[in-house]
Amino acid sequence: MVDLIRDSLAGKVAVILGVGPGQGISTVRMFINFGAKVAVVSRSGNTFGLVESSTIKAYKTDATNPEELQKLRDKIMADYGSIDVLCNNVGVWRQPKGEFEDPAEMEEMFRINVMTMYNSIRIFSEAMKKKGGAIVNIGASRNIFKGNSISYTVSKGAIEELTRKTAETLRKYNIRVNAVLPGGVNKEDNYYKVFPFNYTKISETVQLEPIEIAMVTSFLGSEMSTGITGQSITVDRGMSA
């Protein structure tokens, strides 16, 4: 299966939005491992130790700004000539403040966690319509909703329906849209320590290694998952079962 995923992704262009320590950079490394060309997008423009080359380029962008997203898409198209996979990893979590947050905080959380994803799908799918492609959204397992703020749980819950509806909209262009819903994820950048399957057993811990999310994301970005669209796949070591 690994060889088939590599055959599917080799030479493809993957855009990873919201790259940071943990699952963001692990996803970048996973796509590189499968031979993809990767656009590493973050607010800082950090490559996290990766050396830029003809197949790895870093882009500094505020993904919450639709105008910057459009400029980013055009820049990546100019650099690579196509976009085949989009991974939406932008999101924010904040400590709950009382029972009900200020409405402005609710709106801000929705703007970052939902509207950024909506705008990136809307903008980047334009570059994918001729050839088709795959979009993977990163949401959250419902298991971690308990005890979190209303704004966080509502915004993350909305990603599931956003995924389903945009999959319906883009199906005619052969663009698949799916979501990964992680549980609690280790924030440590330990990709090379864990790769490929050196993480703890499912019975031993509830905290995921970033590479576990990266593996499912790369599968959904590959043609191995060609029959899957509009789905939200929970990856939380069974805590929501």
Image (spheres, rainbow, N blue to C red):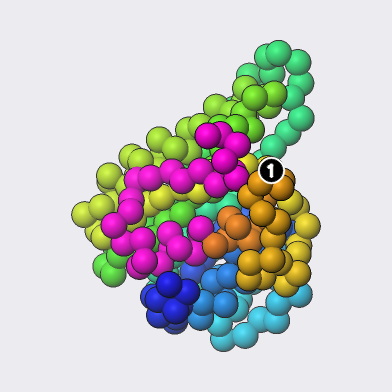
Q: Residue at x 61, y 76 (%)?
A: 57
What x and y, as percent, mark residue 42? 66, 60
Say whether residue 139 is left or right of residue 78: right
Can residue 66 be seen at all in this image of the molecule?
A: no
Q: Is residue 143 above or below residue 80?
A: above
Q: Residue at x 40, y 76 (%)?
A: 4
Residues in magenta? Answer: 216-241
Q: Residue at x 35, y 41 (%)?
A: 164
Mark 1 — residue?
206
Say whether residue 2 is left or right of residue 214: left
Q: Is residue 125 above or below residue 111?
A: below
User: Hey, which quadrant is residue 150 in on the image?
Assistant: top right
State the SS at label 1: loop
Q: Residue at x 59, y 64 (%)?
A: 27
Outermost residue on the bottom side: it is 54
Q: Is residue 146 above or below residue 205?
A: above
